Image (cartoon, helix red, strand yellow):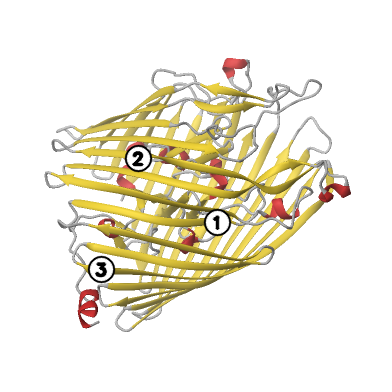
């Protein structure tokens, strides 16, 4: 026992001063070489270099990620992490959950999520329900907005480009006495493209407009006690195409939707025992209002969906010296939704709450070896209790130059309120569950000039919720024609490989390859053994960036996405279709006019590649943009 105790109290393995620190994996700061899970980070420099307007476009060049979009900017966008459904991953902004309780499966609408004042993105792959709860089957996307600064700072950019696109973003931050703040806003407008693919006859451009704002305020009451206030707001309007009478086939229409989202957070932080015991008590609030309109119909407003998420949470972190850390907490999450549609004017409402407790320990029993293990218990007001386990290990025998990783993780997803309480609802649903594992290695060479990693993963998901037709089920006695039930299974496995090189000063080369085989394993299903829809197996992304001696920066990204399966529901009966693979090339450049002012520009889809990520929906062709960036 004495020997074991002395091992546990050994100091943590040293790590390089420039090593990346991540927070999403353990809900506390950890050097990357101490993390056993698979995680990717995009810092502010990477976000600025890529010049992407939407978060989904940023994520598509990370390992294990694919996305599909129903048209141009602002359209319905699905992000698949390791083959999981879009609604099976959690999206956070400044630590607050963004998923929409009013959507069919409780997922998040990526269409309105812009890079604007996002300063950092962390993508945690794999099931992560021990610390993050329901929906984290595929992974967790954590978005961090600009933080308050010690000195007054201003960041802004203005951009104009193809299709009459305008993007304006500004942020100001600073500190005065005990008060620190970072406040920003953004505006994006574009004429867009036809949501109904132009290659199939679409001619009407479907435009998009978005207003957004973000804020962080900190108040230092004492050296050990502080208050955090955070807010994020987005209001988007998207023109859409639909299925007009009399033929009810996909075509140009004047339909449009509006989506308004507000996120609020208030937290009290207190540290004791010289900072070794850190506590946080917080209230988080998410409100979503989605409306759909058809100017040719009466009434014009066709549908209204409202979702609200309220979370009261406590989290504690205790450092038992440097070699052992405990993270623990308790939460109560309450979800509400309401919907009205022109064909269902009486509407439907529903609510549910989940009480949760969790604990996780991070130990360094030997120099370079980090072990993590935890458990969570959730009690849902409808389906009852569920326990989730997780464990991981990271071993670096040479101060972070080589890191071996392995993790086992479990995840679950509670039935959405729509699946429980809509006109197709089934209050007897059970949660979807998943368990998976991954192993990987990261190798740094030549003082970090070369870094390569390879990861293999597998995940099995059970009890998936699917829509079923009514014949023979007592739930249909009220006249409905369908309902939700737990019937489906799926597996996902694959390989993620990355390579990053800096062979000379100013030159950076990055290459990412993902192979994701995600299959339907539902016994008796006509889709048994087939790749899940809209998920390509193969994805390759290669980026080259160079800073010239005279300060000009140039870069290019070549993205190859393999073919994917989709379903043609216009056919009778519905049948599988193959969406062909495609290659898209983007180029970019920037130049510092002064220490505070840059000019920049990019050309997206340089060779005007035609492709579809969703059957019959258009994708942007070649487009050019130019802008100015201010930093004071």
* Residue 612 in view in this figure: yes
Q: Residues within 10 Å of mark 1 (few under 14, many from 20)?
A: many
Task: Say which residue appears at 44% left-offset and 51% top-offset.
Answer: 436
Q: Is residue 134 above or below residue 478?
A: below
Indicate which disc, 1 or 3, sits on the residue closer to the N terminus: 3
Give residue 364's mark: 3
Residue 563: horizontal and vertical position, in percent? 47, 25
Q: Could you tell me which residue is drawn at 44 percent across and 53 percent down?
A: 142
Q: Which residue is mark 2?
A: 496
Q: Residue at x 30, y 51 (%)?
A: 632
Instruction: Name the foreground residue: 70 vs 531.
Output: 531
In the image, which disc is placed on residue 222? Answer: none
Q: Secondary structure at mark 1?
A: strand
Q: Residues within 10 Å of mark 2 (few under 14, many from 20)?
A: many
Identify the image quadrant of residue 385.
bottom right
Q: Is residue 404 left or right of residue 158?
A: left
* Residue 45 x, y percent position in the rendering: 30, 45
On screen, residue 310 versus residue 363, left or right, reads right
Q: Which residue is mark 1?
A: 412
């Amino acid at each position: 026992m004495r020997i074991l105790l002395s091992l546990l109290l050994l100091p943590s393995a040293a790590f390089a001063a420039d090593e990346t620190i991540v927070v999403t994996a353990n809900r506390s700061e950890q050097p990357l070489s101490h993390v056993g899970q698979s995680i990717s980070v995009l810092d502010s420099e990477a976000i600025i270099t890529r010049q992407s307007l939407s978060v989904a476009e940023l994520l598509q060049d990370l390992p294990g990620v694919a996305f599909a979009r129903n048209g141009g900017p602002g359209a319905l966008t699905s992000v698949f992490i390791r083959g999981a459904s879009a609604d099976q991953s959690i999206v956070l902004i400044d630590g607050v959950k963004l998923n929409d309780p009013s959507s069919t499966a409780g997922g998040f609408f990526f269409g309105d999520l812009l890079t604007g004042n996002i300063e950092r993105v962390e993508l945690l792959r794999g099931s992560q329900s021990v610390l993050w709860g329901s929906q984290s089957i595929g992974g967790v996307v954590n978005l961090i907005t600009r933080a308050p600064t010690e000195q007054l700072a201003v960041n802004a950019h203005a951009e104009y480009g193809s299709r009459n696109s305008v993007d304006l973003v500004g942020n100001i931050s600073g500190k005065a006495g005990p008060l620190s703040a970072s406040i920003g806003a953004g505006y994006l407008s574009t004429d867009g493209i036809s949501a109904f693919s132009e290659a199939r006859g679409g001619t009407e451009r479907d435009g998009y407009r978005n207003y957004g704002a973000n804020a962080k305020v900190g108040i230092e009451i004492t050296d050990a006690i502080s208050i955090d206030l955070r807010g994020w707001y987005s209001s988007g309007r998207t023109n859409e195409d639909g299925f007009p009478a009399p033929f009810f086939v996909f075509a140009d229409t004047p339909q449009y939707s509006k989506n308004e989202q507000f996120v609020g957070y208030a937290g009290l932080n207190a540290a004791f025992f010289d900072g070794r015991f850190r506590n946080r008590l917080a209230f988080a609030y998410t409100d979503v209002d989605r409306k759909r309109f058809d100017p040719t119909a009466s009434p014009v407003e066709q549908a209204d969906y409202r979702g609200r998420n309220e979370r009261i949470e406590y989290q504690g972190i205790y450092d038992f010296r440097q070699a052992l850390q405990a993270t623990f907490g308790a939460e109560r999450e309450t979800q509400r939704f309401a919907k009205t549609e022109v064909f269902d004017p009486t509407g439907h409402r529903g609510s549910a709450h989940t009480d949760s407790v969790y604990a996780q320990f991070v130990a360094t029993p030997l120099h370079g070896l980090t072990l993590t293990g935890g458990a969570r218990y959730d009690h849902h007001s409808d389906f009852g209790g569920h326990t989730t386990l997780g464990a991981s290990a990271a071993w670096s025998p040479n101060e972070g130059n080589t890191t071996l990783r392995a993790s086992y993780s479990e995840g679950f997803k509670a039935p959405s309120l729509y699946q429980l309480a809509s006109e197709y609802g089934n209050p007897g649903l059970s949660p979807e569950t998943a368990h998976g594992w991954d192993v990987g290695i990261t190798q740094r060479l030549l003082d970090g000039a070369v870094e390569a990693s390879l990861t293999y993963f597998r995940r099995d998901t059970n009890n998936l919720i699917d829509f079923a037709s009514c014949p023979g089920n007592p739930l249909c006695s009220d006249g409905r024609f369908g309902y939700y039930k737990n019937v489906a299974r799926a597996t996902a496995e694959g390989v993620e490989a990355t390579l990053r090189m800096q062979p000379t000063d100013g030159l950076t080369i990055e290459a990412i390859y993902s192979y994701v085989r995600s299959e339907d394993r539902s016994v008796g299903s006509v889709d048994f053994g087939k790749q899940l829809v809209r998920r390509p197996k193969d994805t390759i992304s290669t980026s080259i960036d160079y800073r010239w001696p005279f300060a000009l920066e140039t870069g290019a990204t070549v993205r190859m996405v393999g073919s994917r399966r989709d379903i043609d529901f216009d056919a009778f009966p519905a049948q599988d279709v193959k969406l062909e693979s495609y290659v898209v090339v983007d180029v970019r450049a920037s130049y510092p006019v002064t220490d505070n002012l840059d000019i920049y520009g990019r050309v997206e889809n340089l060779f005007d590649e035609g492709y579809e990520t969703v059957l019959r929906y258009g994708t942007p062709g070649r487009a050019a943009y130019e802008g100015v960036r201010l930093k004071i």
